[in-house]
Amino acid sequence: MAVQGAAELAIETTGLTKRFGARTALDGIDLQVPRGVAFGFLGPNGAGKTTIIRTLLGLTRASAGSMRLLGHPVPAERSQALRRVGAIVEEPRFHPFLSGRENLRLVAAVRGPEARERIEPALARVGLSERAGQKVKSYSMGMRQRLGVARCLLADPQLLILDEPTNGLDPGGIQEFREMIRAMVEQEGRTVFVSSHLLDEVERTCDAAAIVDRGKIITQGAIADLAAGGEARHELIVAVDDPQLALGTLAGSELVVEARPSDEGLRVILAGGPETAAGVNSALVRAGVGVTRLEPVRHSLEQRFLAITSRLDASVAPEEVKA
Amino acid sequence: MSATIAARMYGADLLKLRKKRSTVIWALVLALLPVIIFYAVNAVEHASSASHEAAGGIEHFHTGLRLLGGLFFGPLVAILIGVEAGTTDSADGVLRDLIVTGRSRLALFASRVPAALTLCWAVVTASYALNLIGTFAFADGLPTPSGPQVLEGWGFVLLATGVLCAVAVGFSTLVDSRPGGIIALIAWQVIASPLIASISSLGSGREFVLAQAIAHFGPAGVRDMHGAEIAMAGGTATVVIALWLVVFLALGAWRARTMDT
């Protein structure tokens, strides 16, 4: 991922360190989250995901390093920085004896007059208008998550920070949440920072991610780059009626870096982007090879994650899954 | 922070407190029931025996003031409400959601105090009104308090409960524990304060007991309610009360500003 200016970054940390006594929870974190993307913060339980969120939001103090949120240095300009930030840290919590609407009124009172006017639109946005008068203690986990998002929306946030947002949600709720995150990024231009230990979650929802383990950033970048191992690599599975002729044809092609037989057909690494697949198909057809299948291979972030986190055997080779 | 936002934060804190049904019900029970029982029992005794004096009048008014202002029930109400105000955000896990709005932690702490005082004073004023009704309704020819005495009594009840309520907000924020705050403050108010006041060998050191300093401002008939009446100058009593307020509100503010959430 290219280094961007501070103004273009939603979150930027340099050498961020947090110690709890002798234990180092964050160890010199350098994180860059561009604006206008869904950014996954991926790591196993205990890796330091919640700690970095709590540090960014001023819920706990950093031991060393610097941070910027939406271009503002924190904690020096914490108030301005958080004005357009919405966050759910761990599970969303509310006063159970108050209604959903009353809970939002409390936060709106603290945020300012304009936040009060956003209560009803925010409730409508998350589909809670009809239940907003009921006490929160009667809400399901999914409803609490949605109310948590509504609370974030009171800030009209440029940046949403969501800590394990799909925890406790049923499959329908998870799908709904993913769609909401994508809509916030694509339709509303917000930046969404999602921490998760669920690889599939990040891969399906996010444009870019950082992988953290034991308080250190292992790698960060676009999802496709991360999955491919640092730089985008486009591969195809090609099923043909004459594999030997096909291999011979592709061996001399400048469109292909490597072609080799596999159980599913030929495994072809392209020299260019995905559009190169059309040229490979044409070359094979011109050579008289019958092509019965031509399918791009998507590298799994999960395998990449398993390969690079220090908790797993480093010798596990990345596998691929079909798109 | 603008006055509008401060007013809305106060309103929000008051909403939290008055909607906490269990706290409000217990506060009302503690404030009203003893006064009702006190006058009901005395009225029944007076009705059943002519030798038993009437249930109202100024002496019973002073007894009602003891119940409310210093002895037990008024302070209990103040502690209950003050501790609730000091801990409810933290106990319900909502404090971090308020902090991430960017609003200063000190402002969040500060808005708890007037909200707690409002509810506390509303409850004890209702109880004080009940005391007045009993005083006048059951006087049956006995002398009743004058207008200035009524105002003095009300002022004393507001002072006694208000100071303790504010101290309870600061102390409970400091310890960040609802049960811990309630137990420690009740133990101090009900057990330790009268005990210390009764140990004459402590001499002028007893002037630092908050209840003694507050009692100094009570009407003449209710100053001896904490085991012994400690003679102290008005200035000393004022300084002691101010010290308690400043120390515990400052400790609460410090804790609110520095605590991890």
Image (spheres, coloured by chain):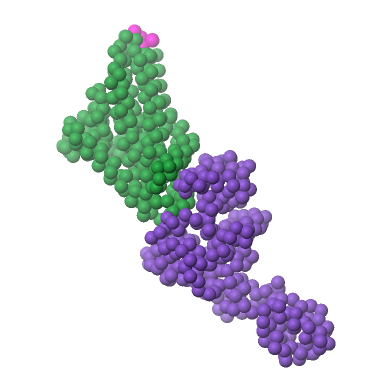
Chain colours: A purple, B green
In percent of width and height, residue B15 lies at 47, 38
Question: Which residues lie in the magenta part?
Answer: B46-50
Q: What's the residue at 45%, 58% (across, down)?
A: A81
- Is residue A246 visible in the rendered image? The answer is yes
**In this picture, residue A78 sits left or right of residue A291:** left
**In this picture, residue A40 sits left or right of residue B72:** right
Q: Quadrant of the N terminus of chain A?
A: bottom right
Residue B232 picture quarter: top left
Residue in front for this viewpoint, A268 or A1 = A1
Residue in front for this viewpoint, A184 or B185 = A184
Residue in front for this viewpoint, A124 or A50 = A124
Q: What's the residue at 71%, 81% (across, down)?
A: A276
- Is residue B174 visible in the rendered image? The answer is no
In percent of width and height, residue A317 lies at 61, 79
On screen, residue B200 above or below A215: above
In percent of width and height, residue B9 lies at 43, 43
